[in-house]
Image (cartoon, helix red, strand yellow):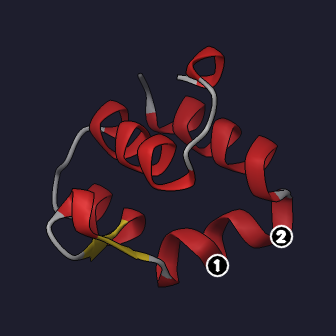
Amino acid sequence: MKHSEFWLRMEQQFGHGYARVWADSHVMAELDGRTASEALDQGESPKTVWRAVHANLQLPASER
């Protein structure tokens, strides 16, 4: 998964304006206490971060 696909999926879930806000502010245990933005900035793959977001939001398997 590319960063662009990650952000597209985030925008589909949260809307254009809120996706970045959520990624910058929501700390997840699945990312070792980091936000999605922090994890991406620290080199975590977008696929790994999306899986954490997916699990955290308890999205359906079809959105994985």
Q: Position of residue 59 (x, y in %)?
A: 61, 38
Residue drawn at point x = 49 percent, y = 78 percent: 24
Establish if 48 lies above or below 29: above
Residue drawn at point x = 63 percent, y = 28 percent: 60
Horizontal side, residue 24 vs residue 42: left or right: right
- Near mark 1 (Cα within 10 A), the count class, few <14, some 14-19 or many ≥20, is few
> In the rendered image, which quarter contains the N terminus?
top left
Q: Which residue is the extreme one toward the bottom?
A: 25
Residue drawn at point x = 75 percent, y = 48 percent: 13
Establish if 51 lies above or below 56: above
Horizontal side, residue 8 vs residue 57: left or right: right
Asked which secondary structure carries label 2, the reply is helix
Q: Position of residue 48 (x, y in %)?
A: 28, 37
Mark 1 to mark 2 CA distance (whole Å):
7 Å
Q: Amino acid at mark 2?
A: Gly
Rendering quarter of residue 5: top right
Q: Amino acid at mark 1?
A: Val
Mark 2, residue position = 17
- Near mark 2 (Cα within 10 A), the count class, few <14, some 14-19 or many ≥20, is few
Mark 1, residue position = 21
Please tell me how many numbered marks the rendered image carries: 2
The answer to the question of whether label 1 and label 2 lie on touching residues, with beta carbons closer than 8 A, is yes
Establish if 15 lies above or below 35: above
Horizontal side, residue 37 vs residue 16: left or right: left
Asked which secondary structure carries label 1, the reply is helix
